[in-house]
Image (tube, rainbow, N blue to C red):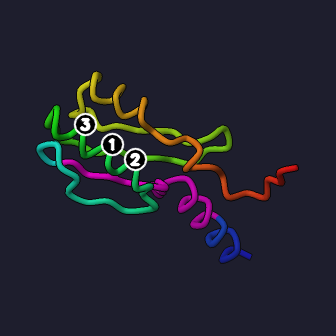
Amino acid sequence: MLYVIIIAALVIFWLVAVDRPVLKVCFKQGHIEKSKGRFPAKFQQNLQEIGERTPFDGELKVYQLRTGPKLAFSKQIPKKVQQRIRNVFPHQGFTSKSGKKTG
């Protein structure tokens, strides 16, 4: 009985504590250094253009929530650049994979 409680606690801890973004992008001097996850081509092109105009370092993470995608920026990314990225973010490209039926 004790082992069931321990396993349940480990599963709950893993679900709560592990950082699981849908997309993770690392920037260095405005260039995309690393990316992990599904990266829409147009969004990637827009990020490269923003980085060329305003070089910056930092990290962008996209989380999928029930209400839609959520962008999380590192503190190194300036507020003006964050707003430009939010403006070009494709919300339709990050729709939930749950069983939503249309028409």
20 vs 29: above or below: below
> What residue is shown at x 62% (from left), y 70% (from top)?
6
Where is mark 1, residue-wise? 46
Q: Residue furthest right?
A: 103
Q: Give the range drawn in magenta.
A: 9-27
Query: Residue 18 magenta-drawn?
Result: yes
> What residue is shown at x 66% (from left), y 77% (from top)?
3
Counting the numbered discs, the total is 3
Going by the image, does 1 lie left or right of 50? right
Q: Which x, y percent locates residue 45? A: 32, 49
Q: How crowded is mark 2: few (under 14 residues within 10 Å), some or many (20 or more)?
A: some
Q: Which x, y percent locates residue 43? A: 40, 47
Q: What residue type is labelled 3?
A: Ile
Where is mark 2, residue-wise? 43
Tell me the number on the disc at residue 14. Answer: none
Q: Are marks 1 and 2 in contact (CB under 8 Å)?
A: yes
Q: Which x, y percent locates residue 63? A: 51, 47
Going by the image, does 77 lie left or right of 92? left
Q: Do the residues labelled 1 and 3 touch (CB within 8 Å)?
A: yes
